[in-house]
Image (cartoon, rainbow, N blue to C red):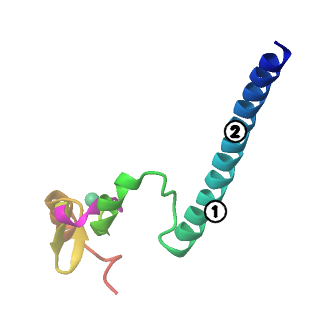
Amino acid sequence: MRQIFLLILLFIVGQWLVKAVRRHDAQTARRTGAQGAGARSANGAAGGGAHPSAAPQLAEPMIRCVECGVHAPKSDSVVVAGQPFCSAAHAQRHGARPSGRDAR
Ligand SMILES: [Zn+2]
């Protein structure tokens, strides 16, 4: 009868050990994964790469509006005389404005 209790105790201790080892493995794997991601982000584009789904958006080049300074995707931008604008309205406003400050 004592042996059965001993076996049960051994089983429980074994389960606990397996669980502890698995937890330790998961922690170390997470730590090494974080290190790898950090090194990759340091090599690649700066900024938080927390969202993997943001990669397709980053593939599209962004332009900076000459008029208001807003960054807009290139597909939504309007390029007039080689200068990018966020919208046609800003392009018109920039063209209509007497560009004494911009002209060199
Ligand atoms: Zn603008």
What mark, if any, has residue 16 been given in the picture? none
> Which of the four quarters of the rendered structure image does ligand 1 lie in?
bottom left
Instruction: Judge depth for marks 1 and 2 and give the one in front.
Output: 2
Residue 86 locus on image (x, y percent): 23, 60
Which of 40 and 63 lies nearest the eye of the viewer? 40
- Left or right of residue 40, residue 27 in this image: right
Residue at the disc numbered 1: 35
Question: Dot 1 lies on which element?
Answer: helix
Q: Is residue 24 above or below residue 69?
A: above
**Farthest-out residue, right:** 2
Marks 1,2: beta carbons within 8 A: no
Mark 1 to mark 2: distance in Å? 26 Å
Of the 4 image quadrants, the one containing the N terminus is top right
Residue 66 shows in this picture:
no
Write the residue at 35% across / 60% down.
55
Which of 12 and 103 lies nearest the eye of the viewer? 12
Which of 88 and 102 lies nearest the eye of the viewer? 88
Q: Is mark 1 within 8 Å of ligand 1?
A: no
Q: Is residue 27 magenta?
A: no
Residue at the disc numbered 2: 18
Which of 69 and 2 lies nearest the eye of the viewer? 2
| Residue bounds of the magenta highlight | 68-75
